[in-house]
Amino acid sequence: MQQYWTPLARVLGLYGDTEAAPSQGTAPPPPPPQDQHLATHWPQLFEAFRRHALEEWVPACERHAEVSPKDMMGLKALAITPHDAVIAQQLSHWQREGSTQDLVRWLVQGPWNVPPVLHWIDFSGFDSLTVRAAPQAPAPAEPASRFDWRQQPQAAPGGKARVWEIEAQTEWVERPQAPAPSVPEPPMPEPTVPESPARDTAPVSGWQIKVSDARPARAMPLPLGLAIVGQEKTVRLPDGTTQALKDGTSLAWEGQDAKYHAVQGALVSGLHLALRTGADGVQCQDLGSTNGTYLGERRLAAGTWTDCPAGVLLYLGGPAGDLRSQAPSLEIARAQPARPVAVEATPLRPVEDVALLRIEPATGGAAVIVKRLPFMIGRDPRCDWVIGAEHAMVSRQHLVIEEIDPAGRRIRVRDLSSQGLTQCGSLSAQALKAGEWIAQDATLVLGASAPYPGVAFALRRNA
């Protein structure tokens, strides 16, 4: 599109008097070479539009303000009419090549983004830009009298022939009122010290569940006793009462106090799964959910307690690998022992950033440093490593790095993509969906699907 700006700037007389505008009837100039965009004259064209606003619109607004000081000019549409066949052809090409909305945005945020123009002109309704066809040449008429100014040819300032004109569709609108001054609020009462919230005194069992759903991967400790897993909503309990289910709240279930853990999934019920944790391990029971609970590909019978050994994966709302349900998964695992760490920086104990991994893109470029786990990769701006929007087959939350095993020189990753588009050697998509240990220095490819090559990178352990 930029090759058409230079002829337009040329006809505005922005190249100086030594370069004349092309005469009517001559052939259009050949298109510039590919590197000619470096020589285009955007600054001059920028100044031409700014000068038009400052010399035409602002004085008209100042004159109108003498009668109606509360009004400002509202610009609705702009039309450019060429008076030269060559210029008409170039403007037509330019209009087809460019985006009207992009040019409107460029005008408002560029040439007209100066205090006098912004003070007098309202651009909120400006959404139309038109390049009209050149008018037909009038039939030869009798010679013009040099004493009749109406028969003289129109000329632009500076004595040059006018080869285009700008027509603006405007209306006078009322200037927005300034916000009223704020009224001081009455003095606040003396603050009261809130009571400390009751701590969760449930005994720790040494077990935890690792959740993989629409949210970032996370681990939740399981206290001894009963826990309910489901999706946040308002449900009717067996005793006939209703209750809003929220993550971390307690509810009464069959005479026991149960801790509620929320997961996100399209086919997950509010009261979906019960977990019973004892000293010897964890058992699970499907609570009559609509879409069931699956141990791999096997659906569990509702109302029956089943042992859940460490490392087992439970899927809520559909079997493993079912793209329709996108079932979230739960993994029963031993809780990691807590380690004393410094969480606040003090003059005597600064917090140090520890680099756990390096992500090295296969295409080169700067490595991405992993300083904490879990580490989310995807197109969502909230991810730890944000993939560019040009990689359309990479999901918003595509892959999470969960754990590092330095002794075994391996890294645990989990594929969260909607279509399972994660590749790592010979590992299956189902294994990566469930979470898989991969070798250190392994290469992964995200979102590879014709015609998209995907994003390839290697995970390197820092020395």
Image: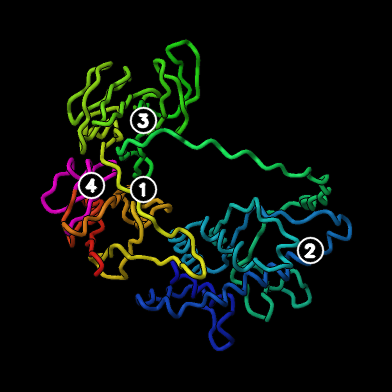
Q: Along the polypeptide, which appears first: circle 2 or circle 4?
A: 2
Residue at numbered disc 4: 421
Residue 257 in percent (x, y) is at 43, 23
Q: For this view, does 331 lie left or right of residue 346? A: left
Residue 193 or residue 246, whichever sits in front: 193
The residue sitting at the right extreme is 67
- Tell me: residue 77, above or below residue 166: above
Region in magenta = 409-436
Gap in Å between the C-alphas at discs 4 and 1?
12 Å
Identified at 75% across, 66% down, the residue is 58
Q: Secondary structure at mark 1?
A: loop
Q: Secondary structure at mark 3?
A: loop
Q: Which residue is mark 2?
A: 60
The alpha-carbon separation of the residues under discs 4 and 3 comes to: 20 Å
Name the front one of labels 4 and 3: 3
Q: Earlier in the sequence, mark 3 or mark 1?
A: 3
Residue occupying the far bottom of the picture: 18
- Residue 402 x/y as whole percent: 29, 50
Residue type, label 1? Arg
Residue highlighted by disc 1:
396
Identify the residue at image location x=30%, y=22%: 291
Quadrant of the drawing holding the N terminus? bottom left
At label 3, the amino acid type is Ala
Q: Say which residue label 3 marks.
A: 266
Please name whichever residue, 63 or 90, is drawn nearer the observer in this view of the structure: 63
Could you tell whether 274 is left or right of 191 in the image? left
Residue type highlighted by circle 2:
Ala
Sequence-wise, the earlier of marks 2 and 1 is: 2
Residue most extreme to the left: 426
